């Protein structure tokens, strides 16, 4: 009943907008379930009893309402990787911005996917929980009035790839807390399942694998997301070319690939034609990159592409990964080949191609150097840092502290340049003070020996350059000034740099982080605070939601909620405004209130 009342209150608050954009409602119970993706039973995080969670299939301008019941034994937040939350960082779902949902409580996310299209995913953002699951794909479709730069596919397939440990996420946390590395992963999953037994000596019997059923002579859109912990993966489909068409909300120039590196936190979508002779099934492979491939051979995800007229199971060796072990430039050149499609329309107010980023003056520039974790204060605990500062989320989230005038939670003195090399990291809550409507340059320098990915919430940024070596002022002369793709996660190779440009037009406090879970957990993140000081009427940012959670110095404002585990699970389909009105009426009637007027 409590959840019903909460839903009814939310629907009433939204009723004024019902005559405009549609709403999609989802009801999620996030809990532990037992699974054995690599043949060993373990506790994973499921949604409505399923691992991975459901695909959120919505359309541009839709309003999304996700009621989350935290049935875990620890706090929970869900973040929406790549969804920009225009004017609404209250729904971002990261510890620096939001209070976590306590165990046994429910909380409702409400946001609009305005001016976006493409492929994204969601995941739990606290305490390495993503290493245990809780993730799923997000598909944001074009409205009918927006042209798509390719024909309508015959099917749409979401593929979640990622490295996996047989240890649960709490054990992984303990390892990092003791100053240890997580070490080599135990495998790679595809849609939460282990590898097809392509090799009897490498893959034990009895492991469940994923099968993608297709029909011959058709074209499928395949959306691939790397939801893993820290491993870059090469994705390929045996015997098929993959036409890249989109990445993280931007249509790309259409190029064929036989395989593509997908780094942690990244999303791509391809068109794949089922034009082979189907003499047997075909392998779908995700294998580790930037590693010793002979040592990591057993850490390979393998699924099966099965034609409806297939004449036998897949057999024989896997298709080879790129043969570039001694060629550091191959993968980087492949990354550089991902360009923006300037002739395509888009869902944004500024159609792709009309936003000439190279002609905009940069107002702020930050060189962010990440290094391998180092010990702090001579103890055994290690921290990861950006520019020598290791971020620890405050008890009172940053945006909440601003809203209530709580001082001393953070400082606005994040350094624009890194300190001299060799200095030990220090713990700090220093935040970048972004200029509203400014144009910021972020240069990520990776001094670590392993691959890193970096992400910015609330924004898509323009990828303008990357190279090996040390970034210098002269590096700007190598920038792509014409068709750098807009996305939200950028890979940075070991001993290399990557540069992005971002227009700070989205008010709020936004997370910039390593997507590698171990680096993120150890503090390799910072927040960018974007405030419109001239906005007295709060027109450029949504007001604090009525169901906001309070914690830290503001915990006195939090109303108690009776824990209520496992009150039933459901997932509601998108509804038209008239259907939502009927739902409001029914909810209020069941809650003992009066029917709404039509």
Image: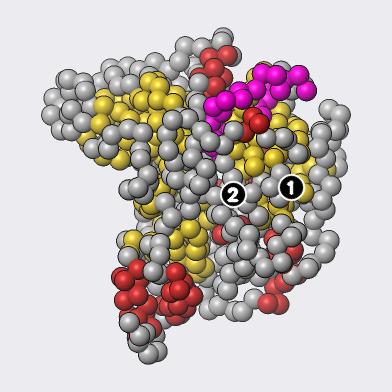
In this rendering, the count of numbered labels is 2
Checking the image for residue 458, the label placed there is: 2
Question: Is residue 591 found inside the magenta-colored segment of the image?
Answer: no
In the rendering, at what x and y percent does residue 54 appear? 37, 52
Instruction: For label 2, count other residues whose C-alpha is less than 10 Å away and answer few (under 14), some (14-19) or many (20+).
Output: many
- Image quadrant occupied by the N terminus: bottom left
Q: Residue tagged by mark 1?
A: 434
Q: Please report contact status of discs 2 and 1: CB closer than 8 Å, yes or no.
A: no
State whether residue 234 is above or below residue 171: above
The answer to whether residue 185 is left or right of residue 535 is left
Span highlighted in magenta in the image:
473-499
State whether residue 171 is above or below residue 5: above
Q: Nearer the viewer, residue 162 or 331?
A: 331
Q: Earlier in the sequence, mark 2 or mark 1?
A: 1
Q: Nearer the viewer, residue 20 or 260?
A: 20
Residue at image position (37%, 31%) is 270
Instruction: Kindly state the secondary structure of the residue where label 1 is placed.
Output: strand
Instruction: For label 1, count other residues whose C-alpha is less than 10 Å away and answer few (under 14), some (14-19) or many (20+).
Output: many
Q: Nearer the viewer, residue 522 or 258?
A: 258
- Image quadrant occupied by the C terminus: bottom left
In the rendering, at what x and y percent does residue 330 appear? 53, 14
The answer to whether residue 190 is left or right of residue 559 is left
């Amino acid at each position: 009943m409590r959840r019903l009342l909460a839903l009814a209150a939310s629907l009433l608050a939204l009723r004024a907008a019902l005559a405009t954009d549609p709403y999609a409602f989802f009801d999620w119970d996030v809990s532990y379930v037992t699974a054995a993706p690599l043949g060993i039973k373990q506790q994973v995080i499921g949604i409505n009893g399923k691992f991975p969670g459901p695909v959120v299939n919505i359309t541009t301008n839709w309003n999304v309402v996700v009621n989350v019941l935290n049935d875990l034994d620890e706090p929970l937040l869900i973040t929406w990787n790549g969804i920009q939350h225009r004017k609404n960082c209250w729904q971002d779902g990261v510890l620096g911005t939001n209070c976590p949902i306590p165990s046994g409580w429910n909380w409702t996310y409400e946001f609009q996917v305005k001016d976006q299209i493409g492929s994204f995913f969601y995941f739990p953002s606290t305490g390495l929980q993503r290493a245990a699951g809780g993730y799923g794909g997000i598909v944001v479709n074009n409205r009918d009035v927006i042209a798509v730069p390719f024909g309508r596919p015959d099917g749409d397939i979401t593929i979640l790839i990622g490295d996996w440990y047989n240890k649960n996420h709490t054990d992984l946390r303990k390892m990092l807390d003791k100053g240890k590395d997580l070490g080599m992963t135990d495998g790679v999953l595809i849609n939460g399942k282990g590898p097809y037994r392509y090799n009897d000596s490498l893959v034990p019997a009895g492991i469940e694998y994923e099968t993608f059923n297709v029909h011959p002579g058709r074209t499928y859109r395949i959306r691939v997301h790397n939801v893993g912990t820290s491993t870059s993966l090469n994705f390929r489909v045996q015997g098929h070319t993959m036409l890249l068409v989109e990445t993280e909300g931007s249509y790309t120039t259409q190029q064929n690939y036989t395989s593509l590196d997908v780094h942690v936190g990244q999303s791509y979508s391809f068109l794949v034609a089922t034009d082979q002779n189907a003499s047997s099934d075909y392998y779908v492979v995700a294998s580790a990159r930037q590693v010793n491939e002979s040592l990591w051979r057993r850490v390979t995800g393998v699924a099966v592409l099965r034609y409806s007229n297939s004449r036998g199971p897949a057999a024989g060796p896997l298709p080879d990964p790129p043969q570039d072990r001694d060629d550091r430039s191959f993968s980087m050149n492949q990354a550089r080949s991902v360009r923006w499609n300037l002739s395509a329309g888009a869902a944004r107010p500024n159609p792709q191609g009309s936003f000439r980023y190279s002609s905009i003056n940069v107002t702020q520039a930050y060189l962010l150097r990440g290094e391998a974790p180092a010990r702090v204060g001579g103890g055994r605990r290690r921290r990861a840092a950006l520019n020598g500062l290791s971020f620890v989320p405050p008890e009172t989230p940053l945006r909440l502290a601003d809203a209530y005038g709580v001082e001393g939670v953070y400082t606005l003195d994040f350094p624009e340049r890194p300190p001299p090399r060799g200095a030990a990291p220090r713990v700090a809550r220093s935040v970048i003070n972004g200029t509203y409507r400014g144009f910021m340059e972020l240069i990520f320098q990776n001094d670590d020996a392993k691959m890193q990915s970096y992400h910015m919430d609330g924004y898509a940024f323009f990828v303008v350059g990357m190279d090996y070596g040390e970034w210098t002022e002269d590096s700007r002369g190598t920038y792509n000034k014409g068709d750098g793709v807009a996305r939200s996660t950028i890979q940075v190779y070991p001993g290399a740099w990557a540069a992005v440009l971002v227009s700070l037009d989205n008010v709020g406090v936004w997370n910039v982080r390593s997507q590698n879970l171990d680096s993120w957990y150890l503090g390799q993140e910072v927040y960018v605070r974007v405030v419109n000081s001239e906005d007295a009427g709060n027109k450029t940012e949504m007001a604090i939601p009525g169901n906001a959670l309070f914690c830290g110095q503001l915990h006195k404002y939090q109303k108690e909620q009776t824990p209520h585990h496992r009150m039933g699970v459901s997932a509601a389909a998108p509804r038209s405004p008239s259907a939502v009105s009927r739902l409001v009426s029914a909810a209020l009637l069941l809650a003992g209130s009066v029917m709404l007027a039509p």
